[in-house]
């Protein structure tokens, strides 16, 4: 199953709940397209909830970085929420864990945008 996205607003923060697999192909392009659409609408605060992501490959990690870069270049901020052990391990191995702001609690993550 490729990645499925569900957007919701918490105050002025767009929370994107992602479920499924973020892999080469459809799963990763969905995230890229969504980030472009959000920046096009002027959304500057995005929180990716990865709690229901079952698998991420190297291409998926690349899409997270692309999303982060897209949002940063548009003057916005993208943060990560609820990393699974596998995703956390991948980000630590690739030394990207220090690039992203990562949160375990949605309320704290949303407050961090203030």
Image (cartoon, helix red, strand yellow):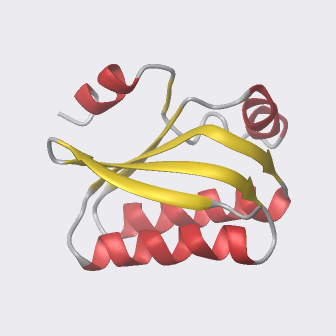
> Is 105 in front, or is 58?
105
Q: Is residue 29 above or below residue 113?
A: below
Q: Position of residue 16 (x, y in %)?
A: 43, 51
- 98 left or right, relative to 16: right
Q: Position of residue 94 (x, y in %)?
A: 81, 43
> Is 65 in front, or is 103?
103
Q: Quadrant of residue 63?
A: bottom right
Residue at 73% across, 64% down: 2
Where's the C terminus, which quadrant? top left
> Is 46 in front, or is 73?
46
Residue at 31% across, 72% down: 39
Q: Quadrant of residue 1?
A: bottom right
- Total tally of numbered discs in the picture: 0
Q: Position of residue 66 (x, y in %)?
A: 58, 67
Q: Position of residue 9 (x, y in %)?
A: 23, 48
Residue at 37% across, 56% down: 7
- 36 left or right, relative to 24: left
- 61 left or right, relative to 14: right
Q: Is residue 29 above or below residue 27?
A: below
Residue at 30% across, 50% down: 8
């Amino acid at each position: 199953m490729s990645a499925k996205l569900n957007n919701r607003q918490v105050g002025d923060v767009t929370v994107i709940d992602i479920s499924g697999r973020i892999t080469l192909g459809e799963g990763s392009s969905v995230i890229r397209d969504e980030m472009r659409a959000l920046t096009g609408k002027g959304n500057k605060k995005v929180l990716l909830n990865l709690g229901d992501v079952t698998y991420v490959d190297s291409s998926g990690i690349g899409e997270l970085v692309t999303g982060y870069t897209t949002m940063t270049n548009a003057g916005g901020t993208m943060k990560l929420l609820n990393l699974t052990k596998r995703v956390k391990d991948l980000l630590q191995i690739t030394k990207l864990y220090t690039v992203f702001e990562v949160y375990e609690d949605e309320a704290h993550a949303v407050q961090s945008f203030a």
